[in-house]
Image (cartoon, rainbow, N blue to C red):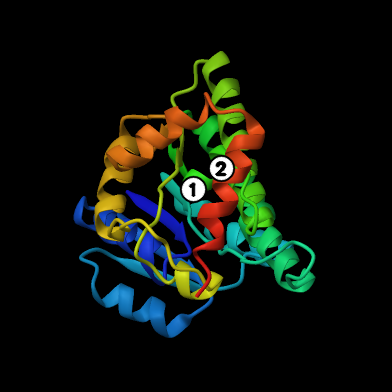
Amino acid sequence: MKALITGASSGIGADIAKELSNLGYDIILVARRKTRLAKVKSELNTKVEIISTDISSTFNCMELYNKVKDQEIEIVVNCAGFGVYGDFTTTSLDKELDMIDTNIKGLHILTKLFLQDFTKRNRGYILNVASSAAFQPGPLMAGYYASKAYVLNLSESIYGELREIKSNVGISILCPGPVDTEFNKVAKVNFAIKSMTSEKVAKYAVKNMFKKKLVIVPGIMMKLNYRFNKFLPIKLLLKISYNIQSKKEL
């Protein structure tokens, strides 16, 4: 049994790796920071392979896939991603494009390549990490919210295709609210509401992935928020979202 996890050097990715290792899965850790990956490796109980690469590059994604495709991987967790905070007219375009390449392009490539293998074998699990941001627009983090909406819509569409062919392959989308990880530091934000621990989110995500739950939303407050937002007019939702976002800046 083997699982590949991107964004595995810290936070949710690292804790999902620990959870799956505790369940007996050998792990392929993927991220840019080799030193941090080595630290995560030292905390796992099963065989671990480290691959230091940047999945914002199409070439790197293809190279990664070709390197591991013959290992009969059963689980792929696409966790790599980051956010950019600020007014859309003033944020760095280069940083936003890097975010899009990581949050969208890299995830898209790896989902497609591994899904093709999984459907041929008629087994396997893909867990794509989105965010509660996927459920609504997000002024002051417009690109990030849009990137997570892409992850949600892509994965839901794939789920529909798999169901039509009665495939045993599972695809799930993890949509947590605020989580206490390095995301806040990178995005330069501070959440007003209490964050969940990445350990708790990881346990909940893995449990529900194996149940083949489509949309995984950890925490009662986020579940209520998910349902409540569906009934709000878009202009009111935008106003509320802007007010919340404006208080996040560090």
Residues at circles 1 and 2 in contact by the CB criterion of under 8 Å: yes
The numbered dot on residue 134 is 2
Tell me: residue 50, above or below residue 66: below
Q: Position of residue 184 (x, y in %)?
A: 46, 69
Asked which secondary structure carries label 1, the reply is loop
Q: Residue at x 61, y 44 (%)?
A: 239
Q: Residue at x 50, y 63 (%)?
A: 247
Q: Report the Cα–Cα distance between label 1 and label 2.
A: 6 Å
Q: Position of residue 172 (x, y in %)?
A: 45, 36
Position of 234 with respect to 223 (left or right) is right
Is there any visible trace of residue 169 in the rendered image? no
2 and 83: which is toward the camera:
83
Position of 38 with respect to 236 (left or right) is left
Q: Which residue is mark 1?
A: 131
Position of 69 with respect to 200 (left or right) is right
Q: Residues within 10 Å of mark 1 (few under 14, many from 20)?
A: many
Tell me: residue 230, above or below residue 32: above
Q: Residue at x 40, y 56 (%)?
A: 178
Q: Residues within 10 Å of mark 2 (few under 14, many from 20)?
A: many
217 and 103: which is toward the camera:
217
Residue type at mark 1: give it: Ser
